[in-house]
Amino acid sequence: MGKIHRITDSEKELINVIGELPETSPKELLNYTKYKWVSTVVRKLEQLKEKDIVWGPYYQVDYGKLCRNPLHILVCILESRQRYETVISYLTLIEPLKWIYPVLSPHKRLLHVGFISSHDAEMEALLKMLKGNNIITDYVVRVCAYKWVLENPNFFGNPHPPLDQLLNLCEPPDISSGCYDTEWNECDIRILPYLQVGYKGLKMVEILRAEKKLFSREWTYEQVKYSREKMVKNGLIEKRYFISPFPGSQCAHFVLFLKTGDISLTQRILCNFAKGERVLKEYTLCEDWGMLACQSHPVFLTDLMHKLDQIDHIEEKELYQLRSYPGKYFFKQSFEDKYYNFDEQTLEYPYDIYGEKIKEKIAANL
């Protein structure tokens, strides 16, 4: 971990500001830091990206505002006896697959997987099909109908914080998903996946070039710029940076699920967990479970479950340490925009087609 400790206080200030105020321009960052030149700020940001500390900017999507029909995120833990490559080859047939992370486990082969879902029962039926054909041996599905709260690390905070503040009174943020209230046109929806993944630094010119090269779409610069501003103004997207507390390869990456007897208490614990410290956390609710996705110093993870055991209000908890980052099996993508119905303003995935593709692949491998 030696390299990270050579980060200067000025660099820490810069990281903290962009983590909290991602809309701040390089010129405006001079007002928050000790740097005198915009060129210095730009160079420092590039160096931090090269060190795998800063990623972005990108835009987070509020799926509640995207279409008339409800969209959820299905957060899944899949168990299998098959090789990772085999399982992933089936999962990637399901287009709304959002992420895959292998999980460290001494006895089982586990995957932490997320899907965007326009029909939860049909999506779960695909997992049931995979289980029935021994591609996976078991699965857990938790439905998330809420927004995700990102809290970037405070680089002046404690990398190994205590957890004795979890039950303190606080005001958790509103994580309710937005409601559809704006008609989205084709330009809006087509550029959205680029914004979601921070394509080439969010440069509009690069998005225009990609659209023309890949899809022969002839948007103007003003169209693309207006669409982005429209989506920001109406709350569909929010600009963010994703900041690791240490270089990504030196962090522990884990997902924690916990449950109490009171959902408001669960939200309080999520809000207080490592708040203001040198830990990256993103949290939400999955039905009656709280979910935390974190990056931290590895030492923080070593006694995490023991500390949580001391809190009687936490009735159930599950910890999954991610095996690699980004690693050989890492997979992450934006939503699939080709199924957006502009007349109806809906997004519905063809689960029957995914089912047929899975059946064909199973038959071909008999």
Image: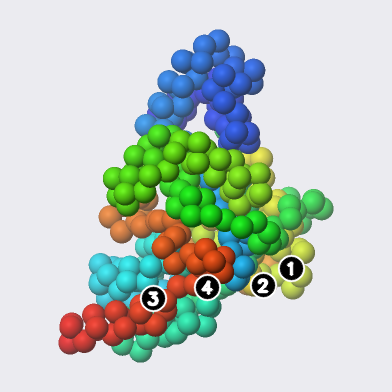
Q: Do the residues labelled 3 and 2 touch (CB within 8 Å)?
A: no
217 to 68, vertically: above or below = above
Q: Name the residue under label 3.
A: 79
Of pointers 1 and 2, the one earlier in the residue sequence: 1
User: What amino acid type should be assigned to the residue bearing mark 2?
Assistant: Asp
Of pointers 3 and 4, the one earlier in the residue sequence: 3
User: What amino acid type should be assigned to the residue bearing mark 4?
Assistant: Ser
User: What amino acid type should be assigned to the residue bearing mark 1?
Assistant: Ile
Mark 3 surroundings: few (<14), some (14-19) or many (≥20) residues within 10 A: many
Query: Looking at the image, which is closer to me, 118 or 12?
Result: 118
Q: Where is residue 27 in the image (x, y as percent from the top left)?
A: 57, 19
Mark 1 surroundings: few (<14), some (14-19) or many (≥20) residues within 10 A: some
* Disc 4/disc 2 C-alpha distance (Å): 20 Å
Q: Which mark is residue 263?
A: 1
Q: Mark 4 points at which residue?
A: 118
* Disc 1/disc 2 C-alpha distance (Å): 7 Å
Q: Name the residue under label 2.
A: 288
